[in-house]
Image: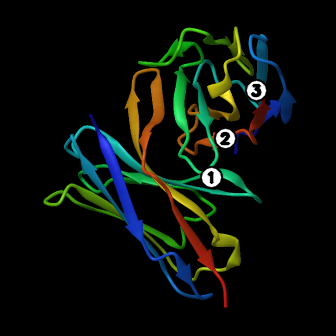
Amino acid sequence: DIQMTQSPSSLSASVGDRVTITCRASQIISTFLNWYHQRPGRAPKLLISAASTLRDRVPSRFSGSGGGTDFTLTISSLQPEDFGTYYCQQSYDTFHTFGQGTKVEI
Amino acid sequence: QVQLQQWGAGLLKPSETVSLTCAVSGESLRGHYWSWLRQSPAKGLEWIGDINHDGRTNYNPSLKSRVTLSVDTSKNEFSLTLNSATAADTAVYFCARRKWFGVDDFFDPWGQGTLVTVSS
């Protein structure tokens, strides 16, 4: 299995702050890395695919970067609706695996 | 706009079978893989497996012996059965479209989720 490790596991930030979440894969996965946002009681929502492709209707304050084993999700200016948990997911292997999540509190 | 609506029994006893169905609207099952995932406090988000319209499947190796995925193209639905359930199978189960094309391989959109509790 490819293990995905996110850091930090949680963070608290203020509206307008720049927030960075990192994800590390246990082996090289090229750019087969996706990011999701999940609010309590809801299904995860796709934000970024292929490490850096912003999906439709996702605000431009979100960006992704990285490749190989190390990846970053950045929120340039945190908004109240951005609270929740963020997950990375590798699709390099048919056996998809997720990070443990980063909980963002406003 | 593609939408997924899922349903199934939410409370089971140990050794019973988890059985869930997901109906797809706004798109044919053709052209994509359709996935099941689950989420629990113990294991986080876990991919269970996926199936295409032809019935071709991929399974999580740790669940493969207990999982069966099926499709009904006439109803545009796909289903999950997980037999010999234990408390460790207690989770919120999600269906999702797997978009798999070139460098893109992701789950979007997702169903609303179904809480399945296995308890005596």
Along the viewing direction, whichever of A57 and B84 lies nearer the viewer: A57
**Total marks drawn?**
3
Instruction: Say if labels 3 and 2 share a chain.
Output: yes
Letter of the chain that mark 1 sits on in the rendering: B
Q: What residue type is labelled 3?
A: Cys
Mark 2 and mark 1 in contact? Answer it, CB < 8 Å: yes
x%, y% of residue B6?
38, 60
Mark 3 and mark 1 in contact? Answer it, CB < 8 Å: no
Q: Quadrant of residue A66?
A: top right
- A67 left or right of A11 in image: left
Q: Which amino acid does label 2 sit on?
A: Phe
Q: In which quarter of the image is the C terminus of chain B?
A: bottom right
Report how far apart the C-alphas of labels 2 and 1 lie in the structure: 7 Å
Q: In which quarter of the image is residue A51?
A: top right
Q: Check disc 2: other Cα within 10 Å, few if <14, some if 14-19, many if 20+.
A: many
Along the polypeptide, which appears first: circle 3 or circle 2? Answer: 3
Q: In this view, does B90 lie above or below A53?
A: below
Q: In which quarter of the image is residue A52?
A: top right
Residue B36's tag is none
Letter of the chain that mark 3 sits on in the rendering: A
Describe the element under mark 2 as helix, strand or loop: strand
- Residue corresponding to mark 2: A98
Residue A23's tag is 3
Describe the element under mark 3 as helix, strand or loop: strand
Q: Is residue B118 visible?
A: yes
- Residue corresponding to mark 1: B46
Q: Which amino acid does label 1 sit on?
A: Glu
Letter of the chain that mark 2 sits on in the rendering: A
Which residue corresponds to the image point at 40% horizontal and 32% vertical from the top-left?
B100
